[in-house]
Amino acid sequence: MAVRRRPIENFTVTQAANVLGISPETLRRMDRRGDAAPSIREGKRRIYTAEDLGRLREMLSGRKRKATTAIALVNQKGGVGKTTITINLAGALATQGYRVLIVDFDPQANCSFGLGVLWNDLEASVADVLGYEVSGPTRQIAQIIRPAAQHPNLFLAPSHLNLAAAEMVVQNTMGREMKLDKALDEVRADYDFILVDSPPSLGLLSINAMVASDAVLIPIDGAFSLEGVRQLLNTRKGCAELSRHPIHVLGGVLNRQRAGTANAAAIMEMATAIFGKRMFQTVIPERTAVDGSTAARAPIVFSGLPEAEPYHALAEEVISSVVEITGN
Ligand SMILES: Nc1ncnc2c1ncn2[C@@H]1O[C@H](COP(=O)(O)OP(=O)(O)OP(=O)(O)O)[C@@H](O)[C@H]1O
Ligand SMILES: [Mg+2]
């Protein structure tokens, strides 16, 4: 009797991406880069076999970087997209297999909200790791970090409104600029990337975010948001001197742009005059689906919609820039 052979399971790009927990765009990009060649190519169709998937899964899980890179998202101008980019960039890195910690270092706690964590439900937050007992006993940062519900590689150190009170107390203490840096040292090795979201000011919280980081990423959405950038870059220099480790300019990124308009081109030119080759080529367009996704607690990067693509492209650029700048 003929032995019935189990049919070989094949997967389309979308099916394979689902199984791997990455976006189809990421899988296509990995294919273009030569990292993820499917066994079968039929014209434009790509077919992944179960064996391909095993190989890719191994590759993605082995994507441990040599060292952790902490990146502060800063701009003293409000509403430029710091929080939206923090969440979606972190999500894009997570889907590529990196372990990512988001530190919400803004008392507005928008980042926590965007990931479905509400400050008024929290027993402890980043405010409690600063050591001044504004809301309860001092905690180690590891005690307040929680897995994010959206992706197994994503973690969150949530914020709370009382981080504003903590900032005031810390203001008059020794080593006030280094509080977050010290707190993070305990957990750095557990992550490939740490992304720190900061408030719309150049105050002590943003300074702590920069001092705790290896690089800064600066979202810009128009001429006004560029105005303070030179001052911001000077503050970064001061932070680096104080912390005695380099704090690189990872880059500026344009957000909420309408492609093809004269205004968008003018802003890109002005931004490039400041950032030079550190201006990211990825431009994040103005999209209704993005606005509101944070408030709806459904980060666009996990949606599979085309609006997620710029964040994946930005993640690619961030990875290359980090390698170039820090050698990590
Ligand atoms: N690409 C985009 N297209 C449309 N809306 C966007 C986009 N990026 C961000 N937004 C919206 O712009 C608003 C401000 O974004 P976000 O909260 O990320 O900025 P922020 O710099 O963190 O603000 P703050 O300085 O108050 O912390 C939000 O309502 C957000 O949904
Ligand atoms: Mg914000």
Image (spheres, rainbow, N blue to C red):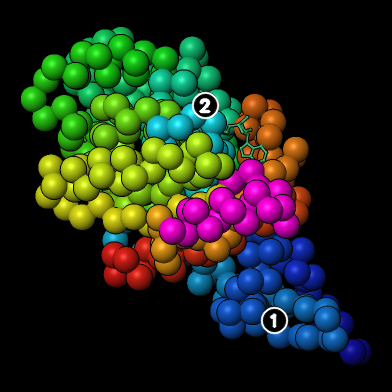
Splitting the image into 4 quarters, where does residue 201 fall?
A: top left
What secondary structure do most residues of the magenta stretch adopt? Answer: helix
Q: Is residue 282 visible?
A: yes
The quadrant of the picture occupied by the N terminus is bottom right
Is 243 positioned to the left or the right of 319 in the image?
left
69 or 145: nearer the viewer: 69
Residues packed near mark 2 inside 10 Å, few (<14), some (14 to 19) or many (20 plus): many
Instruction: Determine the residue positioned at 30% across, 12% down.
Output: 165
Is 79 positioned to the left or the right of 235 in the image?
right
Across the whole image, how many numbered discs are drawn on residues? 2
Q: Which amino acid is tagged 2?
A: Asn
Residues packed near mark 1 inside 10 Å, few (<14), some (14 to 19) or many (20 plus): many
Q: Label 2 vs label 1: CA separation?
A: 40 Å
Splitting the image into 4 quarters, where does residue 140 fall?
A: top left
Q: Which mark is residue 38?
A: 1
192 or 176: nearer the viewer: 176
Return the residue found at the far right: 1
Q: Which residue is mark 2?
A: 110
Q: Is residue 39 above or below residue 87?
A: below
The numbered mark, 2 or 1, whose residue comes first in the sequence reads 1
1 or 148: nearer the viewer: 148
Q: Position of residue 325 (x, y in %)?
A: 32, 66
Q: Position of residue 190 (x, y in %)?
A: 32, 50
Q: Is residue 91 above or below residue 6?
A: above
Q: Which amino acid is tagged 1?
A: Pro
Return the residue found at the far left: 174
Q: Secondary structure at mark 2?
A: helix
Observer-side mark, 2 or 1, equals: 2
Splitting the image into 4 quarters, where does residue 209 fall?
A: top left
Q: Which residues are magenta?
A: 255-273
For ligand 2, tell me if the residue under mark 2 lies within 8 Å.
yes
